[in-house]
C-alpha cells in the first residue's frame, strides 16, 4: 500500500479537525508521505502513553498496518474523543480475511449512520469510512469494523489480552505503555539481553500472548513448494530469508501478523537458526507466533535464553528436520503438533483461562452418540473415553435396543469407570435419526455439542482440536475433512483431497461440533432418516452462520459393505480418492490408536513414516502402529 492510498482513503473527509491514529511498524512512515494538512494531529497508538485529546475533532482516522494491528487497536482507542466521521484504513490483510464491512452492535445504537463506504484501495489495502448524524465512540466503530473483517459467532466473545497488558514482570506487549520494565521492542534490539534491566530468565507467561483470532492456522495448505525459509539474525535484526532474498523482516518486538504469515504459507518449512549470540529476544515471540499459525518450524538445539518458548514447543521444533517435511503428510502432522503446543501455551485465550482459574479450563463438550448396533457400543464409547484436553460427557442413544443387549452393560460399566459422565437413553426404533439426535441433545448439559459416529475412529485430540478451531476461527460450527476412509471389504485406505483450515460449506458428519445457541436458532436437526448432517449445514448457512473445516488427521471414516445411513458404495470413494490409496488400515500417526481398536488388516501402519521414500515404499519400511482384533 502506498502513501497515496491513505490520502485516497481520506479524500472525502469533512470539515473540521482531523485526528489520525496509527499502529504497526510501517504505518507512521506511510502517514508522513500522505500530505494530511496542517489541521491534523497524529497519535502513535503503539508508542508512549498519550495525553487525552482535549479539543473536539470532526474526523478520526485509524491507520493499521494489518488485521492483527486493527485488532490490537480496538483495545487502545478507548480514550479518543467521539467523532461524527470515522475512517479505518487497513494497509494489508491476509487473503482469507474479508473486506472491513462493519457489524453494527444492534439495539438501535447506529440509527444515526448516514453514509458507509468500503473501498479496496489501489495498493491492495482496505478502507471503511462511516458518517453519523452525531459523534460516536471511536472504540465502538473500530470494534465493529474489526468484527466485520474477521467474522465470528453472533454474540459476545472473550476479549483478547489488551496490547498493553502487563505480563507480570514489568514487560509489556507494546512499548511505552506505562510499564517500569523494558518493552518487547527494546528486548528485540541487539545486545538487549546483556543489560541489567532485563529479567535473567523469562517464563512462558512473560512472552506476549498471540491473538489467535488473527494469527492462526487458517490458510494452511497441505501442498507446499520445495523452498525452505531461514529465520536468522542479520546485523542484530531477525529476518526470514528464502534463498538470497528477504521474505519478512521481523519487527523489533517480534510481533507476528496475519500478513507475515500469509507471506510464508508456500514454504515447505522455516529453519530457525539461533546462532551463537544471546538474542535479540524478538526471535522467541516470532517463533511462538509462527508456530501458532501452523508454519512448519524446525530447529537445532534451542539456547537457554529462549526457554520461555516452553518445553513442549521446544521439543516439537527440534524433533524433525527439513528433509522429513518433504512428505506432505508428515509436514501437516508437524504443523498440527506445533499449533497445538503454541496456542495452548501462548494463545491469548489460554492465558486468560489460566489467569482466572489457575488451570487451562475448557467448556464441557457433550458428545451425542446414536447407534442401532449393540455390537458397536463398546468401540464407540472407547473413542470418547480416550479424548484428552477437554471435559466430556456422553449422551448415548440406544436406537431400538436396551442395555440388556449383548455386551452393552459391560461397555457402559467400563466407560463409567473412567469417571466421565454418561447419560443413556433408549428411544423407539421407529424414530427417525434426526429426531433421535435432537432427543439426545435435549438430554445433554454441556454448552458445546459434538456428534460422533459409532463405527469411525477418532484420535485422542479430536475434540480438543475442534474446540481449538472453534476458538481461532470464530465459527458457529466446526468439523473435519474426512481425509482418511477405510474400505473394510477391500482392506484399503483411501485419502480424499480437499482444502482444510478454511471456511467451507461441508464437513464430515461424524465430526460436527457447535454450541446450543446455534442449534436452537436453526431448530436442531431435521426430522429425516438420512442426510441430517447436510441439512443442518444448509440450514446454518441460510442463517448466515460460519462453518469452518479443520484438518482430517484425527479421524478415519469406516466404510462397511452395508449398514450406513449415507448410501454410497466403495466405488464412490475410489473414484474421489485422488489423494492416494494404500493397502491396509493406514491412518495419520496423530490417530494414536489403541491396540484393541485396530481392525484385522494386512497392514496397520501410519500413512507416512519418517525416513520412508514415499507412498510406493515397501511395507517393511513402515513402523507398525499396533495390531489387534476387530472391534
Image: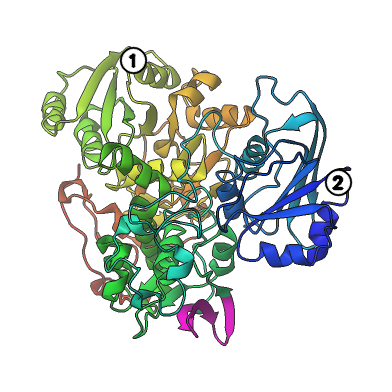
Q: Tag 2's secondary structure?
A: loop
Can you give x and y, in whole percent of width and height, for residue 97 in the image? 63, 50
What label sits on residue 13 in the rendered view? 2
For the point 37% across and 84% down, the residue is: 275
* Mark drawn on residue 429: 1
Q: Is residue 211 visible?
A: yes
Residue 138 in the magenta stretch? The answer is: no
Task: Answer whether residue 243 is magenta in the image.
Answer: yes
Q: Quadrant of residue 204?
A: bottom left
Q: Is residue 524 visible?
A: no
Q: Crowdedness of circle 2 by 10 Å Cα count: few (<14), some, many (20+)?
A: some
> What residue lies at 48% left-to-right and 39% top-to-bottom?
159
**Kind of element beneath mark 1:** loop
- Stretch of the chain drawn in magenta: 229-247
Question: Disc 1 or 2, which lies upstream in sequence?
Answer: 2
Foreground pick, 565 / 109: 109
The N terminus - image quarter? bottom right
- Can you tell which of label 1 and label 2 is closer to the viewer? 2
Q: Is residue 195 above or below residue 398?
A: below
The quadrant of the rendering that contains the C terminus is top left
Cα separation, mark 1 vs mark 2, equals 67 Å
Res 128 → quadrant: top right
**Left or right: 59 with respect to 602?**
right
Q: Could you tell me residue 10's position as x and y percent?
A: 83, 51
Q: Position of residue 531 (x, y in %)?
A: 50, 29
Residue at x-position 72% and y-position 32%: 136
- How far across and down, in percent of the image, does residue 359 sit? 25, 42
Image check: 585 left or right of 231?
left
Amino acid at each position: 500500500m502506498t502513501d497515496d492510498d491513505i490520502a485516497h482513503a481520506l479524500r472525502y473527509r469533512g470539515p473540521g479537525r482531523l485526528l489520525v491514529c496509527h499502529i504497526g511498524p510501517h504505518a507512521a512512515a506511510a502517514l508522513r508521505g500522505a500530505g494530511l494538512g496542517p489541521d491534523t494531529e497524529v497519535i502513535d497508538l503503539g508508542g508512549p502513553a498519550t495525553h487525552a485529546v482535549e479539543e473536539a475533532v470532526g474526523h478520526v482516522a485509524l491507520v493499521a498496518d494489518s488485521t492483527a494491528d486493527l485488532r490490537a487497536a480496538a483495545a487502545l482507542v478507548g480514550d479518543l474523543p467521539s467523532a461524527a466521521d470515522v475512517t479505518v484504513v487497513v494497509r494489508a490483510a491476509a487473503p482469507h480475511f474479508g473486506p472491513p464491512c462493519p457489524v453494527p452492535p444492534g439495539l438501535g445504537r447506529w440509527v444515526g449512520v448516514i453514509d458507509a463506504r468500503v473501498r479496496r484501495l489501489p495498493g491492495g489495502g482496505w478502507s471503511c469510512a462511516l458518517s453519523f448524524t452525531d459523534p460516536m465512540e471511536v472504540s465502538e466503530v473500530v470494534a465493529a469494523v474489526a468484527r466485520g473483517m474477521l467474522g465470528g459467532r453472533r454474540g459476545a466473545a472473550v476479549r483478547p489480552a489488551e496490547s498493553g497488558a502487563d505480563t507480570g514482570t514489568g514487560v509489556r506487549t507494546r512499548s511505552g505503555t506505562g510499564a517500569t520494565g523494558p518493552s518487547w521492542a527494546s528486548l528485540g534490539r541487539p545486545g538487549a539481553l546483556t543489560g541489567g534491566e532485563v529479567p535473567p530468565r523469562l517464563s512462558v507467561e512473560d512472552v506476549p500472548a498471540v491473538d489467535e483470532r488473527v494469527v492462526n492456522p487458517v490458510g494452511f495448505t497441505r501442498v507446499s513448494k520445495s523452498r525452505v525459509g531461514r529465520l536468522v539474525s542479520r546485523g542484530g535484526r531477525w529476518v526470514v530469508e528464502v534463498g538470497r532474498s528477504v521474505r519478512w523482516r521481523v519487527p523489533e518486538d517480534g510481533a507476528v501478523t496475519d500478513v507475515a504469515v500469509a507471506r510464508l504459507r508456500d514454504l515447505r518449512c522455516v529453519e530457525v537458526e539461533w546462532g551463537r549470540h544471546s538474542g535479540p529476544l524478538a526471535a522467541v515471540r516470532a517463533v511462538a507466533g509462527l508456530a501458532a499459525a501452523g508454519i512448519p518450524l524446525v530447529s537445532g538445539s534451542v539456547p537457554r535464553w529462549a526457554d520461555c518458548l516452553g518445553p513442549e514447543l521446544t521439543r516439537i521444533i527440534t524433533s524433525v528436520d527439513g528433509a522429513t517435511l518433504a512428505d506432505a503428510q508428515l509436514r501437516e502432522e508437524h504443523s498440527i503438533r506445533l499449533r497445538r503446543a503454541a496456542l495452548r501455551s501462548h494463545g491469548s485465550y489460554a492465558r486468560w483461562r489460566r489467569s482466572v482459574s489457575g488451570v487451562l479450563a475448557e467448556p464441557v463438550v457433550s458428545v451425542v452418540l446414536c447407534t442401532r448396533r449393540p455390537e458397536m457400543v463398546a468401540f464407540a464409547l472407547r473413542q470418547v473415553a480416550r479424548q484428552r484436553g477437554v471435559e466430556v460427557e456422553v449422551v448415548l442413544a440406544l436406537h431400538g435396543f436396551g442395555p440388556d443387549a449383548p455386551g452393552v452393560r459391560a461397555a457402559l460399566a467400563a466407560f463409567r469407570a473412567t469417571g466421565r459422565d454418561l447419560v443413556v437413553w433408549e428411544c423407539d426404533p421407529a424414530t427417525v435419526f434426526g429426531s433421535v439426535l435432537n432427543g439426545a441433545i435435549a438430554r445433554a448439559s454441556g454448552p458445546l455439542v459434538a456428534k460422533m459416529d459409532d463405527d469411525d475412529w477418532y484420535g485422542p485430540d479430536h475434540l480438543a482440536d475442534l474446540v481449538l478451531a472453534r476458538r481461532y476461527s470464530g465459527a458457529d460450527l466446526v468439523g473435519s475433512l474426512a481425509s482418511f476412509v477405510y474400505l473394510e471389504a477391500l482392506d484399503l485406505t483411501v485419502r480424499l483431497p480437499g482444502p482444510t483450515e478454511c471456511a467451507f460449506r461441508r464437513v464430515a458428519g461424524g465430526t460436527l461440533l457447535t454450541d446450543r445457541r446455534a442449534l436452537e436458532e436453526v431448530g436442531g436437526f431435521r426430522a429425516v432418516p438420512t442426510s441430517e448432517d447436510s441439512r443442518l449445514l444448509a440450514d446454518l448457512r441460510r442463517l448466515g452462520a460460519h462453518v469452518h473445516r479443520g484438518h482430517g488427521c484425527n479421524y478415519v471414516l469406516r466404510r462397511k459393505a452395508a449398514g450406513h445411513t449415507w448410501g454410497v458404495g466403495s466405488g464412490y470413494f475410489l473414484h474421489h480418492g485422488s489423494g492416494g490409496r494404500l493397502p491396509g488400515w493406514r491412518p495419520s500417526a496423530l490417530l494414536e490408536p489403541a491396540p484393541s481398536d485396530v481392525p484385522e488388516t494386512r497392514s496397520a501402519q501410519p500413512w507416512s513414516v519418517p525416513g520412508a521414500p514415499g507412498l510406493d515404499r515397501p511395507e517393511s519400511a513402515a513402523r507398525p502402529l499396533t495390531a489387534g482384533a476387530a472391534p
